[in-house]
Amino acid sequence: MTTTISPTTKLKAVNICLSAMGEPVINSLDDAAIDAQMASDIVDETSESVQTIGWYWNTETHTLAPDVTGQIILPDNTIRVDPLDIRLGNIVQRGLKLFNTDTSTFIFTNPIKLRFSVLLEFDDLPLTAKQFIAIRSARICQQRMLGSDTLYKFDSADENRAWAVLMQEEAETMNANVLRDNWSAASILNRAYFARGAY
C-alpha cells in the first residue's frame, strides 16, 4: 500500500497546536471547539506577523494607474509598497491608497511601478514558511493557554531550527544585491529584528 504524504495545510497547523496542548485534533476547520478556534486564530495571527517581514515568495511587482478620481487604489492584501522610481518622492501606503507625503495628496497623474509585499492565504505559502508558522503557533498556544515554561523551552529549539531552514531557503532563492536593493536590505533587517524578538 502506498502512503501519500501531503504538504502542511492550515488544518494540520491547527492540529499541531492542539496536540502541543494535549487537546484532541479536529477533522475540519469548521469545528466549533473553543480550543480549535483559538488555535486557528493564532495560526492566522502568526502567519500575518511572519508575512509582514517581506519574503521572496510574497513580493510582487506591479504598475498601477490612477482611477477616475486620480487616486491609486491598492489590492486588498497589500502589506507594504515601495515605488521603484525614487524620483517620484516619498510615496507611502495609507490604508489601501497611495499617498505622497511630499505634496500631501492622494492624487496622481501617471501610473506608478511598485513593489509589494502581499498577504497570502496559509495554503499558498511555501512549505518552509508553513512549518515555521505551525511550530511558532504551537509554542504561542502553549504559552498563552497553558503557561508551561517547560513546554515553551522545549519547542523553542524546534522553532529555532524551523526559522533557520526558512532563512536558508530565502538566502538561496533571493538573488538581489543587498547593497543596491533597499527593499531587500529592509527585508533582511526586518527578519533579523523578528528573529531577535521571537525567542
Image (tube, rainbow, N blue to C red):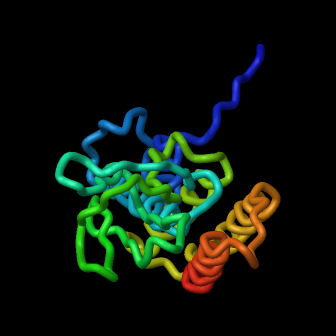
Q: Return the residue nearer the eye: 32 or 83.
A: 83
Residue at image position (30%, 70%) is: 99
Residue extending furthest front? 109
Q: In this orientation, does residue 138 appear? A: no
Residue at image position (34%, 68%) is: 93
Asked if residue 9 is positioned above or below residue 188 in the image, the reply reads above
Asked if residue 120 is positioned above or below residue 160 in the image, the reply reads above
Residue 98: quadrant of the picture: bottom left
Q: Would residue 102 appear left or right of 10 to someone viewing this image?
A: left
Residue extending furthest left? 69
Q: Position of residue 58 (x, y in %)?
A: 55, 53
Q: Position of residue 100 (x, y in %)?
A: 32, 74
Q: Position of residue 130 (x, y in %)?
A: 59, 51
Residue at image position (45%, 45%) is: 121
Residue 8: quadrant of the picture: top right
Q: Quadrant of the N terminus?
A: top right
Q: Return the residue nearer the eye: 169 or 30.
A: 169
Q: Return the residue nearer the eye: 177 or 44.
A: 177
Q: Would residue 116 appear left or right of 94 to someone viewing this image?
A: right
Asked if residue 88 is positioned above or below residue 133 in the image, the reply reads below
Q: Would residue 37 appear left or right of 60 to someone viewing this image?
A: left
Q: Position of residue 46 (x, y in %)?
A: 46, 63
Q: Quadrant of the C terminus?
A: bottom right
